[in-house]
Image (cartoon, rainbow, N blue to C red):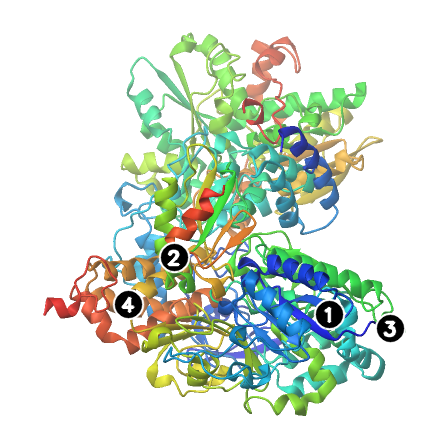
């Protein structure tokens, strides 16, 4: 292998590509060529580096200097000063922004010292942005497929299940079900065929972690799936990727091909009796297919409508065979757990919810993008430290945790630890890890309108409470924003929400009212104002602003 | 059987492992309200009306689908349960027309009954603003009204799983979901056989038959018309249910009496032409056996089945008997033989048939069914429509006297009665064919192997050295299995009876609602009771049929028979309207 | 690109059906690939698929109308999918929508008279990092404002 003096990692995540990263990369290569540095400097396009809002970004190693918000002229400077002369171009270095939005301070400190990264702990994203996702060699060079090798050659299936169970890893798709327990049910079931399905039908609004993991480290998922297959006795894996994720589909297919060529997938893996193959299948635009039984229906060529449980997929899933459905992020945790052991994993995060969590920070926050932090980090740390605070120094109004199906938390919850247990206790959810930060210029009713419309659009229509209920919720919220809602309708809203949570067939309908109920609880005044024909934020067009009305 | 102990509303009960909460509750005398649930179908857990509390579960569970486990504690009536059920029902009602009074199912609607049971007394949600697809009246037999549909999907289940027709499916998503034919086109433009099994399971008025009662009332009121009526074999064992009688009772005499009171000039019996069908079809079978005709020969009494084979197996039409159905033979004879005999101008004769079937409405409108020179049958009413007329006329059905059919087209045998149940045509044919071929009298006329609800039945009969292998299928899903065997060249039968509807005509799409498999069993028993109670039980012994041949037809498969009683079929294909695009 | 060259590159319906018919559950994959041919799934096409897979046409139609990426009627040459989920909503999706409506003179669910654009809503595209975002056919556009989206549309 050639030794390079420097590695330049250009972020190839979709947000950066949208902002012209590919053009910059071409220019970079041309400039390196021009200075005849091609033998010394290697340019690699990687998965997402995280601070999407500040794209395009690139990192130069070994210094670890991250440059952000790049323009073509910046590339010329970086090549000339940093790559040629070895001097970091300080004015281009990415910096944590202060909520005070004051002048940027500080010198070009190495990347690891930036606050943005200091709170992060990269397990799932260990390789994202550090290796070329299209190269299995780079993955292997970073201990890739070591865990699979260890599992199939030195551990029994039961031991693998036990390690995962002991790690207390919980499903990262939203519900937080213990992964080891899920695997143990299927491992115990006898069947001629079992399936491992990787759920990559990421559709929760505000969530794009799975896409970035697939784009940034596809082999991490493949390795996790193969280990799962070994653990429960499955020989067939399927990755179900939402149809809109073109690049993810491409990356995963390429990675599967490479792994198959290397004998890490296929028959007699690493010379053992273990066989495992993976297919990539894609969805066609239906959020509900993120629900595991709807996903299975979709894989069978049907309308993506959830099934009645029981039987649970672990016992009778795809084609009636025992089937594990795990989220992308869950599977990306498997190899590190096997390599480092369950105690290591439990040492991260909280006692009941160990490990890290990938969060997407969105909305009114300075550092929009992806971060991986230990479980139990507080909302305040996410918003004001990792997230760099709220733009323009505006006030924090609420955070919706867990995507559109999660609840909304006002400022009194800023110091609450973010983990599955704590959030479900207050009527919210950690869910997929989407954190939508909303500042005090927004109107609760207006935001809820958007939440509720989403569920109308995505309800599958199978069960009554969700099909009819989502539409009714939206209608009443719409009426509130137009000033035509009544007191009794607020009461009805509560009653309907309760019935949906208790009686809808699947998680979609059960969680659709979460945001509404938490808002009704925490922002009662604002609802009352709308009933009185006033929108305190001045967003709802037909209504007056309170202060003017008085 | 492994049993589990559960507690339902503080009552301990032991039920077989795998039982649902619904079944366990029933055992302690609690009838959990249901809506999408149907005892014969797989549809489950969609309406969320039957939800109950299971102690320890985070959410409410659907009683119709949730299996019990040992030690489970179930609460079927708690504030949370009542609230959720009521809200879910209110949601359905809020997206449903508020015109019960004008609905075909008024007072016999499952949604309406539930609203009463669950105490819905006001409409709390705003009136709906979104409209659904318009009412589809395109077919001869059925009307679909998407506005009334509550998306329970029983019709879809019946159409796909039971009948294997697949004319309708859920389309679109969420609040826009509708049950629709492919492409959202009219039902008449897809391969629907109009069997009406969907109308039988619909809990509301979203699929129902085309109403022919008005035209019958008009004909009855027209003094220039001589209105005669024929009743199908299966009506006598089901009509009583419309008036509160227990399923399984034979009401032949009351049925005749009711029709007479409605003003029909003559009350005849389709059983007469059922006997005639046996003579014609029996001879056709013998001819095919002797002369090397297309075998197996398949019966042609069931218009839903005829439409099915025309759509799905058009290359196999030569297997069908050319005999018209008894309804159509009756119509053709009423306007020829009967007209001649009575001297009534056939243009003034108006033939009404009472059928357990919706497809009969389609059949009597087929263009080839005019061999008498007129529409052979003018109106085909379902059992339900007849009941509606009897109610409208204020006739107290239960207290009617027993009366007899009119001669000659009302004279029949037990062989004709059993046409009403799956296997009946086969049994009736065997009774006749055996005696015609062997010239011996059957020791026992009962061919029990072909009776009952089982989907496909087989038997072998020894006709003095010639073995005849027969098969009987009921329900189109089973018919499809037999057709696929024929297609693969694996069917070694000589004669096959196929009835479109599960259980045969006693389970027809025009029968009283509800028609469940349990009720079908009772009607089947009644059919064989009626057969047993008749002095004549073989079609070839029917004296009126003998006279018909002597006076009019001359001989089976003769020229007149061919003209009036036989027909041919049309290749329709699966995509009937594709050519028009 | 001329019409002829387009036809050469397009998959052949019969071949696509042949390719998938042995794989149980492949209806979605099949519909994806077949939709490439005409840009939508016509009745004729759905009937041939039903025939090939041995399932009812109503089922094919039921599946095709369930998923938002499948079209059962002709659409414009370019489908503009505008994200209406919360992260885009609070970053000005409404403004972007209004700009598109104004520029093209169509509302969501409609197609321009010249058949060039169809506008429709979509749920989250996972492009929240650059909200508000839209997709035009396979191409994504983010960080939009009313001016920027007008610029984007001008390039078509």
- Of badges 4 and 2, nearer the viewer stands 2
The residue labelled by disc 4 is A443
Q: Residue pushed farthest left? A: A550
Q: Secondary structure at mark 2?
A: helix
Q: Name the quadrant containing residue B159.
A: top right
Is disc 3 in the same subunit as disc 1? yes
* Residue A79 spot, x, y in % from top left: 64, 68
How far, Cα to Cα, is label 4 from label 3? 58 Å
Q: Are marks 3 and 2 in contact (CB under 8 Å)?
A: no
Left or right placement of residue B465 versus residue B261 in this view:
right
The residue labelled by disc 2 is C93
Q: Is residue B545 above or below residue A353?
A: above
The residue labelled by disc 3 is A270
Crowding near the residue tagged with mark 1, few <14, some 14–19, many ≥20 C-alpha atoms within 10 Å = many
How far, Cα to Cα, is label 4 from label 1? 51 Å
Which residue lies at the image location 59% right of the left edge and 84% below the top edge? Answer: A112
- Of badges 4 and 3, nearer the viewer stands 4
Q: Are marks 3 and 1 in contact (CB under 8 Å)?
A: no
Q: Along the line of sight, which residue is nearer the eye, A143 or A111?
A: A111
User: What is the chain identity of the residue bearing mark 3?
Assistant: A
Crowding near the residue tagged with mark 2, few <14, some 14–19, many ≥20 C-alpha atoms within 10 Å = many
Q: Give the quadrant of the N terminus of chain A.
A: bottom right
How far, Cα to Cα, is label 2 from label 1? 41 Å
Left or right placement of residue B373 versus residue C2 in this view:
left
The residue labelled by disc 1 is A41
Q: Earlier in the sequence, mark 4 or mark 1?
A: 1
Q: Along the line of sight, which residue is nearer the eye, A527 or A53?
A: A53
């Amino acid at each position: 292998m050639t030794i390079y003096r420097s590695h330049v990692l250009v972020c190839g995540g979709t947000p950066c590509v949208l902002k012209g990263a590919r053009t910059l990369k071409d220019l970079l290569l041309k400039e390196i060529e021009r200075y005849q540095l091609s033998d010394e400097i290697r340019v690699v396009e990687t998965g997402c580096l995280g601070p999407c809002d500040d794209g395009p970004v690139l990192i130069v190693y070994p210094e670890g200097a991250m440059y952000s918000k790049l323009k073509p002229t910046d590339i010329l400077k970086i090549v000339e000063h940093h790559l040629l002369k070895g001097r970091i171009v300080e004015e281009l270095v990415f910096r944590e922004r202060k909520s005070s939005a004051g002048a940027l301070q500080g010198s070009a400190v190495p990347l690891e010292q930036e606050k943005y990264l200091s709170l992060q702990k990269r397990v799932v994203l260990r390789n994202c942005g550090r290796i070329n996702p299209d190269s299995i060699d780079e993955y292997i060079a970073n201990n890739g497929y070591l865990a699979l090798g260890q599992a199939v050659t030195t551990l029994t299936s039961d031991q693998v299940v036990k390690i995962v169970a002991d790690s207390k890893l919980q499903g990262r798709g939203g519900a937080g079900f213990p992964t080891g327990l899920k695997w143990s049910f299927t491992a115990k079931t006898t069947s001629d065929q079992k399936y491992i399905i990787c759920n990559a039908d990421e559709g929760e609004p505000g969530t794009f972690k799975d896409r970035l993991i697939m784009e940034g480290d596809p082999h991490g998922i493949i390795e996790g799936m193969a280990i799962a297959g070994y653990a429960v006795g499955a020989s067939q894996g399927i990755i179900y990727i939402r149809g809109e994720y073109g690049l993810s589909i491409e990356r995963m297919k390429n990675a599967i091909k490479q792994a198959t060529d290397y004998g890490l997938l296929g028959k007699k893996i690493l010379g053992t009796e273990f066989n495992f193959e993976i297919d990539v299948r894609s969805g066609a635009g239906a959020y509900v297919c993120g629900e595991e039984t709807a996903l299975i229906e979709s894989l069978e060529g049907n309308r993506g409508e959830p099934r009645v449980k029981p039987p649970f997929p672990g016992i009778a899933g795809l084609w009636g065979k025992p089937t594990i459905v795990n989220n992308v992020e869950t599977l990306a945790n498997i190899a590190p757990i096997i390599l480092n052991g369950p105690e290591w994993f439990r040492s991260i995060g909280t006692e009941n919810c160990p490990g890290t969590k990938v969060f997407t920070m969105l909305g009114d926050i300075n550092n929009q993008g992806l971060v991986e932090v230990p479980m139990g980090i507080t909302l305040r740390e996410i918003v004001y430290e990792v997230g760099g605070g709220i733009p323009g120094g505006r006030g924090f109004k609420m955070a919706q945790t867990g995507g559109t199906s999660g609840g909304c938390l006002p400022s009194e919850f800023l110091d609450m630890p973010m983990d599955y247990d704590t959030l479900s206790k207050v009527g919210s959810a950690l869910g997929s890890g989407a954190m939508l930060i909303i500042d005090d210029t927004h109107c609760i009713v207006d935001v809820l309108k958007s939440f509720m419309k989403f569920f109308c659009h995505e309800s599958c229509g199978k069960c009554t409470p969700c099909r009819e209920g989502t539409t009714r919720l939206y209608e009443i919220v719409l009426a509130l924003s137009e000033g035509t809602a009544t007191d009794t309708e607020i009461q009805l809203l509560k009653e309907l929400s309760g019935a949906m949570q208790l009686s809808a067939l699947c998680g979609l309908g059960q969680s659709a009212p979460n945001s509404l109920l938490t808002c009704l609880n925490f922002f009662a005044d604002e609802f009352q104002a709308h009933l009185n024909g006033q929108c305190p934020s001045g967003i709802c067009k037909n209504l007056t602003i309170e202060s003017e009305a008085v | 059987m492994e049993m589990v102990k559960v507690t339902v509303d503080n009552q301990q009960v032991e039920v077989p492992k795998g039982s649902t909460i619904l079944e366990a509750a029933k055992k302690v005398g609690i009838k959990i309200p249901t809506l999408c649930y149907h005892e014969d179908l797989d549809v489950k857990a969609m309406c969320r009306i039957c939800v109950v509390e299971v102690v320890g579960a985070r959410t409410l569970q659907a009683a119709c689908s949730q299996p019990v486990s040992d030690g489970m504690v179930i609460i079927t009536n708690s504030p949370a349960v009542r609230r959720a059920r009521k809200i879910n029902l209110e949601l359905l009602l809020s997206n449903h027309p508020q015109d019960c009074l004008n609905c075909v199912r008024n007072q016999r609607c499952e949604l309406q009954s539930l609203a009463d049971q669950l105490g819905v007394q006001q409409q709390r949600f705003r009136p709906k603003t979104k409209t659904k697809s318009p009412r589809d009246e395109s077919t001869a037999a059925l009307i679909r009204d998407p506005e009334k549909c509550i998306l329970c999907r029983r019709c879809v289940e019946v159409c796909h799983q039971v009948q294997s027709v697949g004319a309708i499916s859920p389309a679109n998503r969420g609040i826009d979901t509708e049950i629709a034919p492919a492409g959202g086109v009219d039902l008449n433009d897809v391969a629907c056989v109009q069997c009406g099994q969907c109308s039988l399971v619909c809990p509301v008025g979203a699929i129902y038959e085309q109403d022919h009662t008005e035209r019958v009332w008009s004909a009855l009121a027209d003094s220039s018309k001589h209105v005669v009526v024929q009743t199908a074999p299966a009506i006598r064992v089901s009509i009583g249910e419309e008036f509160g009688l227990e399923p399984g009772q034979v009401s032949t005499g009351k049925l005749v009496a009711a029709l007479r009171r409605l003003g029909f000039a003559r009350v005849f019996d389709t059983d007469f032409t059922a006997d005639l069908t046996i003579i014609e079809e029996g001879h056709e079978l013998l001819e095919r056996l002797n002369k090397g005709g297309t075998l197996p020969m398949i019966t042609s009494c069931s218009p839903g089945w005829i439409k099915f084979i025309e759509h799905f197996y058009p290359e196999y039409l030569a297997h069908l008997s050319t005999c018209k159905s008894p309804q159509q033979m009756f119509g053709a004879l009423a306007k020829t033989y009967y007209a001649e005999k009575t001297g009534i101008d056939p243009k003034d004769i108006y033939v009404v048939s009472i059928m357990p079937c919706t497809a009969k409405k389609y059949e009597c409108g087929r263009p080839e069914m005019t061999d008498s020179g007129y529409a052979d049958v003018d109106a085909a009413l379902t059992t339900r429509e007849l009941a509606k007329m009897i109610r409208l006329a204020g006739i107290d059905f239960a207290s009617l006297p027993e009366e007899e059919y009119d001669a000659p087209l009302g004279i029949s045998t037990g062989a004709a009665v059993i046409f009403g149940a799956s296997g009946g045509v086969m049994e009736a044919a065997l009774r006749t064919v055996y005696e015609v071929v062997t010239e011996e009298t059957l020791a026992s006329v009962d061919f029990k192997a072909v009776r009952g609800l089982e989907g496909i039945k087989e038997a072998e009969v020894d006709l003095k050295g010639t073995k005849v292998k027969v098969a009987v299928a009921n329900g189109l899903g089973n018919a499809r299995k037999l057709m696929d065997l024929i297609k693969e060249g694996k069917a070694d039968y000589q004669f096959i009876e196929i009835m479109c509807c599960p259980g045969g005509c006693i389970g027809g799409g025009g029968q009283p609602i509800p028609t469940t498999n349990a009720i079908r069993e009772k009607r089947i028993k009644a059919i064989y009771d009626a057969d047993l109670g008749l002095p004549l039980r073989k079609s070839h012994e029917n004296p009126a049929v003998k006279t018909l041949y002597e006076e009019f037809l001359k001989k089976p498969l003769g020229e007149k028979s061919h003209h009036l009683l036989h027909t041919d079929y049309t290749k329709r294909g699966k995509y009937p309207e594709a050519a028009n695009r | 690109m001329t019409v002829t060259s387009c036809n050469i590159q397009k998959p052949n319906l019969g071949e696509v059906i042949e390719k998938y018919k042995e794989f149980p559950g492949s209806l979605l994959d099949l519909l994806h690939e077949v939709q490439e041919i005409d840009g939508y799934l016509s009745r004729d096409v759905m009937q041939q698929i039903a025939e090939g897979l041995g399932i009812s046409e109503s089922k094919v139609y039921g599946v095709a109308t369930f998923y938002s990426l499948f079209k059962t009627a002709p659409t414009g040459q370019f489908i503009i999918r505008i994200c209406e989920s919360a992260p885009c909503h609070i970053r000005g999706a409404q403004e972007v929508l209004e700009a598109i409506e104004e520029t093209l003179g169509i509302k969501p669910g409609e197609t321009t008279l010249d058949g060039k654009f169809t506008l429709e809503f979509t749920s989250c595209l996972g492009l929240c990092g650059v909200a508000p975002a839209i997709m035009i056919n396979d191409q994504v556009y983010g960080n939009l404002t009313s001016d920027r989206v007008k610029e984007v549309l001008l390039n078509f």
